[in-house]
Image (cartoon, helix red, strand yellow):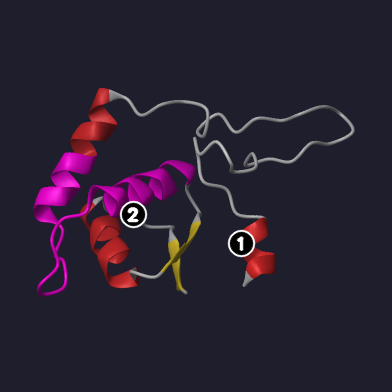
Amino acid sequence: MATALRDCTVPHARSSPGALRPTAAGQPVCLLCNTPLDLAEWHRIGGALSIADLPPKKHPNVVDALVAITAVRHGSAVVFTSDPDDVSAYLSALNAQDVRLVAV
């Protein structure tokens, strides 16, 4: 697990490595990781929080919704999560088609 997580990126986290690694041609940058969410995306998160079909006894969680919108923005993303049912509910609310969840 530690080997897989070492290469994972958490956008905007100070201790996280960049999404793209340095190459001989220079340092590439992920535009999505370096672009803050706009007002429309914050509204999408709010909408997902209100309509997500969460498991029983679960409450809306803005962090899970933020993970979901980040994955949707990247497209073809893989999300490692200990709450696959929660994140899946937010992905469904956001109408995500190409995000894969891996339970850890």
Compared to 44, does 57 lie above or below? below
Separation (CA) of disc 2 from disc 1: 23 Å
Q: Is residue 87 magenta?
A: no
- At 61% from the left and 62% from the top, the residue drawn is 5
Q: Residues within 10 Å of mark 1 (few under 14, many from 20)?
A: few
Is the residue marked by circle 2 packed among few (<14), some (14-19), or many (20+) residues within 10 Å?
A: some
Q: Type of residue at label 2?
A: Ala
Question: Where, by quadrant of the figure, is residue 20 drawn?
Answer: top right
Q: Which mark is residue 96?
A: 2
Residue at 76% x, 29% y is: 27
Disc 1: which residue: 5
Task: Name the quadrant containing residue 69.
Answer: top left
Return the x and y of residue 37 as percentages of the image width and height: 35, 29
Assign the magenta stretch its main secondary structure.
helix
- Left/right of residue 15 with respect to residue 87 in the rendered view: right
Q: Position of residue 16 (x, y in %)?
A: 59, 43
In depth, the one of 57 and 51 nearer the eye is 57
**Residue placed at 10% from the left, 75% from the top?**
56
Q: Which residues are magenta?
A: 45-74
Quarter of the rendering occupied by the N terminus = bottom right
Question: Which of the two labelled residues, at mark 2 and mark 1, occupies the earlier sequence position?
Answer: 1
